Amino acid sequence: MILQINMTDSTPIYIQIRNQIVMGIADGKIALSQPLPSVRQLADELGVNMMTVNKAYTLLKSEGYIETDRRHGAKVCSKINFSPSFSLQLNNELEMLIAQSRVRGMEKETFLKKCADIFESFESKTQLGAENSYNI
Amino acid sequence: MILQINMTDSTPIYIQIRNQIVMGIADGKIALSQPLPSVRQLADELGVNMMTVNKAYTLLKSEGYIETDRRHGAKVCSKINFSPSFSLQLNNELEMLIAQSRVRGMEKETFLKKCADIFESFESKTQLGAENSYNI
DNA sequence: TATTTGTATTACTATTGATAATACAAATAA
DNA sequence: TTATTTGTATTATCAATAGTAATACAAATA
């Protein structure tokens, strides 16, 4: 399994890369401390420019998901903190999503159920062994 | 109370207007079917261009929050539907938010509690009478 | 010495955001 | 009637940003 880039999607490539790596960590396809491919290697595989991958890695690094070392390349952090900046972002985005859901008539219980389902879908995937890890 | 535009914020003005109107509806400061100020009037009050307000109104209309009538101006819809496109957007955004929260060590219960709190904060505000409505 | 790493720099292009000036049709108020 | 007010369409301009790309570089390793 390799990252899937959708060139017709309006979402920028480096955001797609970033999102898929975060999702990969969340559902256990990418392990903590796992080395990531080099920017050149991943760029080759995806058919994009090296600096596009670098931009994704720089973003992931600034968010605390990965760390890079000049020689050893990039790897997932061994521990990913719940930072204050993420806490702010989470609050703001949840507030907007809930405002919209509420205005459209969604009940609180329905919303919470949806969240619980998504959360549990990650938990079940994470139980999978390392043999299901991403081939990146 | 008037809409508060932050010119130093990187969020585009028309998005700020859109967000604040959605939030206003959600917490009851703006009622269903309530008339909104004309694009010229709101533009004057905010000190922005008429077409910037028009852009916000066009977005709100496309999302089903408001409707416009050539003579009577814009007003909030009497009923705002839970559209398939919003359902998709909600799923995608929740998936990303939950992935990030989980990776950062947030427990499912903590996440659900946060959502419930936000939901309830809207519910309590909505109980307020019409005298608390926005002065827009 | 050769190779591989991330990264800094620079450049190019397309897109976006905001504003502006008009103009128009429709509806209302005088 | 006439004047005014509504949203909107059109066109234009300008600045800033975003996205991608090509290249070069320092550091570390084999």
Image: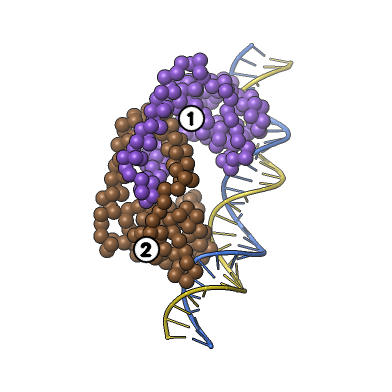
Chain colours: A purple, B brown, C yellow, D blue
Q: Residue at x 58, y 30 (%)?
A: A4
Mark 1 to mark 2 CA distance (whole Å): 41 Å
Q: Residue at x 47, y 21 (%)?
A: A31
Residue A23 is tagged as 1
| Chain letter behind tag 2 | B
Helix, strand or loop status at disc 1? helix
Helix, strand or loop status at disc 2? loop
Residue B36 horizontal/vertical position (percent): 41, 64
Residue B14 seen in this snapshot? no
Amino acid type, residue under disc 1 in the picture: Met
Residue D29 horizontal/vertical position (percent): 60, 14
Residue A67 seen in this snapshot? yes
Q: Which residue is mark 2?
A: B34
Horizontal relation, residue B13 to residue A10: left or right: left
Amino acid type, residue under disc 2 in the picture: Gln
Crowding at dot 2, Cα within 10 Å, few <14 / some 14-19 / many 20+, comes out as some
Horizontal relation, residue B51 to residue A113: left or right: right
Residue A33 is tagged as none
Q: Nearer the viewer, residue A69 or C1?
A: A69
Residue A87 horizontal/vertical position (percent): 38, 38
Horizontal relation, residue B133 to residue C29: left or right: left
| Chain letter behind tag 1 | A
Q: Residue at x 49, y 62 (%)?
A: B53
Q: Residue at x 51, y 33 (%)?
A: A19
Work out which quarter of the rendered image holds the C terminus of chain A and state it: top right
Give the answer, above or below, for where C17 lies relative to B69.
above
